[in-house]
């Protein structure tokens, strides 16, 4: 029997709450589709700081290396915010994991079912058919990782902090390719987002992307927007976009905007991929909800488990080629949400159910 070797990193806050649901769903579809699961669970983030003194213990890293995909919850929260910045869960665990495995391509599908348009803050007449966009975010470059990065007390008594935004043309080309491949499978349109009227990195981004598409993907329709305009267009007319494609920090911000335009951050799954392959000859990846540890609702059975469950579905699809199982999960989530069983973030005034009930409904729909 084919067995999927998965490193499970629930993390902090609502991470463990929604991970429980994703694991139950995975077990169910594994039985239905006839594959086995070999899941090992590892501490990461604040949980790892509490238990082992560091956010990314060696054992966790090794566990990820030994696996064929990582299913990640979320990390961070108020408890660890007073630690030195470099030791905090986000910078000491999540970013190093992305870098360690060169997961440069972050795919975030912004999907709003027509039945859920009421959950979007946008007026229904702007999105009568719902929304279907995919955001491709560069994930291992830009201002997140560029050097120097420092805080210095100056001689005049002032304090100066520096972050550096760096991109190489080769980094831009490899993420442009991911956007192009996604567009070929969809509507054939890519909108590249930058700030080429101000930033050197964006000038290089736009030039590289333009040349790359002209040479390699002339059949695709490429457009460019400045990030400020893109943020506005995303709320004024989201359906003009097919594939939205951008650098690391712009993608972080625009994807949260995309999430809420599509109903809630609790629905937005993601896949982070690189060039590495697992033993199935498919991309090794890290799969996580786009949202965070949601300290404001932790422990209240309020978190929407869909983003975590849909991230597990993306994992089955991309890292294991289990298309039928992924379809099953995505259809079950869609059906349950359409039926009106919804957590508070997408209930929009109607009666909401808790995390557990939402998972139960998805499990029941799976049959
Ligand atoms: P957040 O995404 O955790 O929360 C923002 C808002 O969205 C909150 O109101 C929260 O309740 C809501 N929300 C998020 N996920 C939800 C879900 N599944 N269901 C229902 N509502 C949901 O962002 P934040 O408050 O800025 O950050 C909190 C912590 O999470 C910080 O430490 C931050 O660094 C961390 N964070 C981690 C990740 C990650 O691990 N991938 C991502 C984003 C933020
Ligand atoms: C995300 C998160 C992370 C990011 C943080 C927690 C480091 O916001 O995955 O979107 O900025 O990439
Ligand atoms: Mn983010």
Image (cartoon, rainbow, N blue to C red):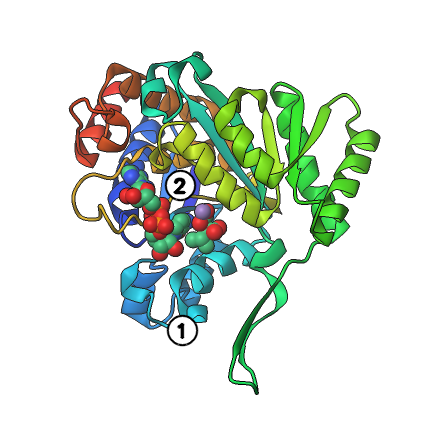
* Classed neighbour count for the residue bearing mark 1: other residues with Cα under 10 Å, few (<14), some (14–19), many (≥20): few
Res. 106 visible in picture:
yes
Q: Residue 192 — which label?
A: none
Furthest toward the bottom, the residue is 155
Q: Residue 84 — which label?
A: 1
Res. 33 visible in picture:
no
Residue at 35%, 72% in the rendered image: 83
Quarter-wise, where is residue 21 in the image? top left
The answer to the question of whether label 1 and label 2 lie on touching residues, with beta carbons closer than 8 A, is no
Quarter of the picture containing the C terminus is top left
Kind of element beneath mark 1: loop
* Classed neighbour count for the residue bearing mark 2: other residues with Cα under 10 Å, few (<14), some (14–19), many (≥20): many
Kind of element beneath mark 2: loop
* Residue 356 place in picture, x, y as percent: 18, 35
Residue at 59%, 24% in the rendered image: 242
* Residue 277 place in picture, x, y as percent: 59, 44
Q: In this figure, which residue is indicated by the disc labeled 2?
A: 289
| Residue 346 appears left or right of 111 | left
Residue at 17%, 29% in the rendered image: 353
Relative height, residue 298 to residue 312 (above, below)? below
Q: Nearer the viewer, mark 1 or mark 2?
A: 1
Classify mark 2 as within 8 Å of ligand 1 or not, answering yes or no.
yes
Q: Which of 110 and 44 is in front in this view?
A: 110
| Residue 221 appears left or right of 327 | right
């Amino acid at each position: 029997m084919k067995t999927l070797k998965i490193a499970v990193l629930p993390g902090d806050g609502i991470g463990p709450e929604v991970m429980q649901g994703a694991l139950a769903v995975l077990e169910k579809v594994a039985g239905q589709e006839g594959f086995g699961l070999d899941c090992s669970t590892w501490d990461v983030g604040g949980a790892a700081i509490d238990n082992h003194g560091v956010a990314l213990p060696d054992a966790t890293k090794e566990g990820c290396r030994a696996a064929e995909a990582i299913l990640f919850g979320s990390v961070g929260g108020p408890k660890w915010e007073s630690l030195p910045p470099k030791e905090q869960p986000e910078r000491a665990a999540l970013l190093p994991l992305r870098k360690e495995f060169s997961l440069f391509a972050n795919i975030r599908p912004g999907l709003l079912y027509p039945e859920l348009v009421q959950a979007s803050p946008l007026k229904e007449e702007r999105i009568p058919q719902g929304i279907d966009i995919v955001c491709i975010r560069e994930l291992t470059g830009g201002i997140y990782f560029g050097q120097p990065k420092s805080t210095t007390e100056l001689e005049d008594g002032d304090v100066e902090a520096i972050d550096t935004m760096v991109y190489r043309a080769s980094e831009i080309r490899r993420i442009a390719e991911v956007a192009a491949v996604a567009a070929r499978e969809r509507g054939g349109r890519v909108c590249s987002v930058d700030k080429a009227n101000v930033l050197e990195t964006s000038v290089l981004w736009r030039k590289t992307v333009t040349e790359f598409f002209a040479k390699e993907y002339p059949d695709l329709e490429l457009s460019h927007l400045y990030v400020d305009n893109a943020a506005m267009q995303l709320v004024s007319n989201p359906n003009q976009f097919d594939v939205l494609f951008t650098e690391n920090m712009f993608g972080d911000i625009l994807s949260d905007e995309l999430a809420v335009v599509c109903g809630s951050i609790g629905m937005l799954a993601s896949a982070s991929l690189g060039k590495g392959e697992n033993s199935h000859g498919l991309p090794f990846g890290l799969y996580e909800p786009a949202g965070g540890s949601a300290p404001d609702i932790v422990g209240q059975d309020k978190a929407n488990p869909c983003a975590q469950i849909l991230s597990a579905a993306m994992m089955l699809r991309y890292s294991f080629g289990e298309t039928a199982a992924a379809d099953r999960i995505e259809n079950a989530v869609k059906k349950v949400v359409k039926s009106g069983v919804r957590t508070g973030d997408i209930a929009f005034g109607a009666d909401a159910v808790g995390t557990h009930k939402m998972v139960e409904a998805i499990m029941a729909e799976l049959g």
